[in-house]
Amino acid sequence: MIQNFKELIEKAKKNPKIVAVAAAEDEHAIQAVIEAKKLGIADFILTGDKEKIIALVEKNGGKIKDFEIIPTQSFDESAVKAAEITGSGKANAIMKGLTPSPTFLKAVLNDKGLKKEGSILSHIALMSVPGWHKMFLASDCAVNISPKVEEKKIIIRHAVEVARKLGIKKPNTALVTASEVVNPKMKDTLDVEEILKSAGEFQDVFLGGPFALDNAISEEAAVLKKVTHPGAGKADILILPDLSAANIFYKSLIFYAKAESAGIILGAKSPIILVSRSDSEESKINSIALACVVS
């Protein structure tokens, strides 16, 4: 397992990939793209308003010759073109620029885009919290509102896929709820019970739960609460019960604990980088690096 984001970036640099950016005429996206290019993480194909893209690249100290720019006339066309480029194999991952999220995802999930039959999209966050002894993954912090049992299984598989790309051969995967005890009045705990009935579907994974957050990440808390699962207190992956819990958890770490993060979406034919304008440039670059390592 990598120990920090510097190691993630170094890992990405060893095998640089190509990222297609939908509607790259966005200053925040351009800043991240220029820095990622300078670091040697990836090359980029930029779709969108060519004149605006050139102006932003020059304004932010980039070199026009470093980028392939494909002019488009609308956000729809930018998203479709970026999805087609990625789907054809010319790019390894796709990133949202100024394109509105619904427009972007519609293009990604188009039959001619990156749609993957039998799957759903899910977000995986890689977190590094100051003072905490290791990095960990959390899901789903951005996409699925109230996932059902079968959807949660896919969310688990996506997170495990990322963990293995990061060097964890048998990730400790904690199914987190508000309680470590199955409670008929708490649907999340019943979902965990149902998922564990088919634990055999998940090969080379320490899958356990329900865990409350404390005994998922703290061995001391697990001992005190007499949680005996071999993965208790050692979580590499936290599977949160729904979007509200996951998103609050994620943003609490970012803003209160000053955590460093990366986030990608899996479930399409290629990784998706869907960053928020409120994300730091550091987080955007980390997300690009993570997508390149996973692709």
Image (cartoon, helix red, strand yellow):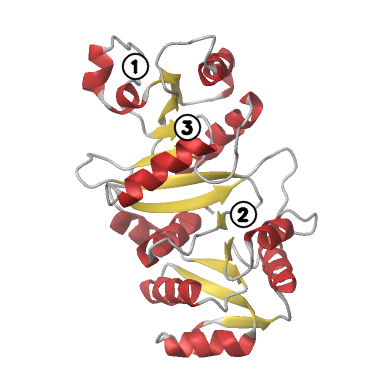
- Which x, y percent locates residue 150? 65, 27
Q: Quadrant of the N terminus?
A: top left
- Which x, y percent locates residue 111? 80, 54
Residue identified by numbered label 2: 270
Q: Residues within 10 Å of mark 1 (few under 14, many from 20)?
A: few
The amino acid beneath tag 3 is Leu
Q: Quadrant of the C terminus?
A: bottom right
Residue identified by numbered label 3: 240
Q: Residues within 10 Å of mark 2 (few under 14, many from 20)?
A: many
Going from N to C along the chain, the mark reached first, 3 or 1, is 1
The amino acid beneath tag 1 is Pro
Give the mark toward the camera: 3 or 1.
Answer: 3
- Dividing the picture into quadrants, the one containing residue 283 is bottom left
Q: 105 above or below 99?
A: above
Residue at 72% over, 46% down: 116
Q: 108 above or below 63?
A: above
- Which x, y percent locates residue 178? 42, 22
Mark 3–mark 1 CB contact (< 8 Å): no
Label 3 secondary element: loop
Label 1 secondary element: loop
Residue identified by numbered label 1: 230
> How far is mark 3 from mark 1, CA to CA?
19 Å
| In the foreground, 121 or 292 | 121
> How far is mark 1 from mark 2, CA to CA?
34 Å
Residue at 45% over, 55% down: 290
